[in-house]
C-alpha cells in the first residue's frame, strides 16, 4: 500500500500542451465497483474501474484516465485517457484545443479571439499576426512579407495549393482591417475570417495529432480483436 501522504508522479505526454512532463497524481485510483463474479469454492472476484486525475505542471490542465482491474485480468494494465480528447475544428478562448498549437501561434490566436467580439478590424489584423506566427513556426519567413512567406510555405509543400489560396485571402482581409484607406471589416465578415484561419491551423497542427490518435485507436482495436480470437 502507498502511504496516504506520499505524492505520486507519472511521466507522460500531456494531451493539452504536448509536453513530456511528470504529472502529479491528484486523485489516485479512485475505485468504482462494476461487477462481482462467483468462481466456485465460495471465491468471488470483483471487476473495478479505477480513475486517476493527473495535473500537468506545465499548463496546469488536468487529465482523467481510467483502467479496469480484477483478479483474473492480466497484470498488464491498459489506461484509457477520458479527458482531454480530440474534438473537431472549432476554437474558442476556453477551449483546450488551443494547446495543440505552438506557443507563439497560440498567443497570437488567443489575442485575436479576445478582440473578436469587440472589433472586426482588430480581429482581422490579429489573425494576420497569427498567420505570421505560423510562418515563423514553419520556418518559411521571406523578407518579412506575409504573402511571400505563405508562398514559401506552399512551395515547401507544407500546405496544399487550396490552403495557400485560403491563407492568401485571409491576408487580403487582414489588409482591409489594417488600412482605413481600404475600407473596413464588419461583423458580417467575422465568420468567414474565422473559418479561413481555423482551416489553416487545423491542417497544420490538428491533423498530425488526429493522424497519431487514430493510429493508436486502430492499433488497440486490432490488439483487442486479436486477443478475442
Ligand atoms: Zn500540459
Image (spheres, helix red, strand yellow):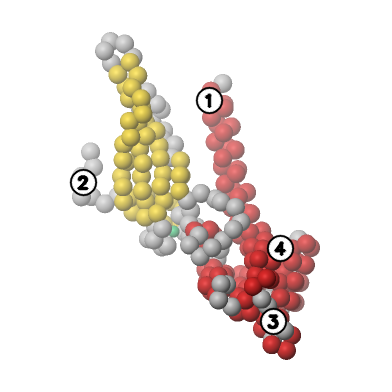
Earlier in the chain: of badge 1 and badge 4, it is 4
**Pointers 2 and 3 in contact (C-beta within 8 Å):** no
Rendered location of residue 29, percent (x, y): 32, 41
How dense is the environment of label 2, judged by Cα within 10 Å: few (below 14), some, or many (20 and up)?
A: few
Q: How many angstroms separate mark 3 from mark 1 (CA)?
A: 62 Å
Q: Earlier in the sequence, mark 2 or mark 1?
A: 2
Q: Do labels 4 and 3 touch, CB within 8 Å?
A: no
Label 2, label 3: how many angstroms apart (C-alpha)? 61 Å
Residue that label 4 marks: 158
Q: Considering only order in the chain, which callout, 1 or 3, is on the residue closer to the N terminus?
A: 3
- SS category of the residue bearing label 4: loop
Where does label 1 land, which residue? 227
Residue wearing tag 3:
184
SS for callout 1: helix
How far apart are labels 2 and 1 at the CA level?
37 Å
Which residue lies under the disc numbered 2?
4
* The residue carrying mark 4 has its beta carbon less than 8 Å from ligand 1: no
Q: Is residue 200 above or below residue 52?
A: below
Amino acid at each position: 500500500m502507498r502511504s496516504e501522504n506520499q505524492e505520486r508522479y507519472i511521466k507522460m505526454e500531456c494531451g493539452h500542451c504536448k509536453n513530456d512532463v511528470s504529472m502529479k497524481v491528484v486523485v489516485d485510483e479512485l475505485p468504482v465497483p462494476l461487477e462481482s463474479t462467483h468462481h466456485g469454492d465460495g471465491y468471488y472476484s470483483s471487476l473495478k474501474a479505477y480513475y486517476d486525475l493527473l495535473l500537468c505542471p506545465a499548463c496546469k490542465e488536468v487529465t482523467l484516465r481510467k483502467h479496469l482491474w480484477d483478479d483474473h485480468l492480466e497484470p498488464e494494465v491498459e489506461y484509457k485517457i477520458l479527458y482531454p480528447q480530440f474534438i473537431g475544428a472549432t476554437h474558442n478562448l476556453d477551449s483546450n484545443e488551443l494547446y495543440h498549437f505552438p506557443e507563439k501561434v497560440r498567443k497570437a490566436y488567443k489575442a485575436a479571439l479576445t478582440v473578436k467580439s469587440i472589433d472586426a478590424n482588430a480581429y482581422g489584423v490579429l489573425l494576420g499576426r497569427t498567420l505570421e506566427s505560423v510562418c515563423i513556426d514553419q520556418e518559411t519567413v521571406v523578407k518579412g512579407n506575409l504573402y511571400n512567406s505563405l508562398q514559401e510555405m506552399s512551395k515547401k509543400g507544407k500546405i496544399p495549393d487550396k490552403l495557400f489560396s485560403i491563407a492568401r485571402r485571409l491576408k487580403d482581409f487582414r489588409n482591409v482591417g489594417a488600412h482605413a484607406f481600404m475600407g473596413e471589416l464588419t461583423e458580417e465578415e467575422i465568420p468567414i475570417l474565422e473559418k479561413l484561419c481555423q482551416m489553416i491551423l487545423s491542417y497544420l497542427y490538428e491533423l498530425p495529432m488526429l493522424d497519431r490518435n487514430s493510429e493508436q485507436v486502430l492499433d488497440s482495436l486490432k490488439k483487442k480483436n486479436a486477443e478475442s480470437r
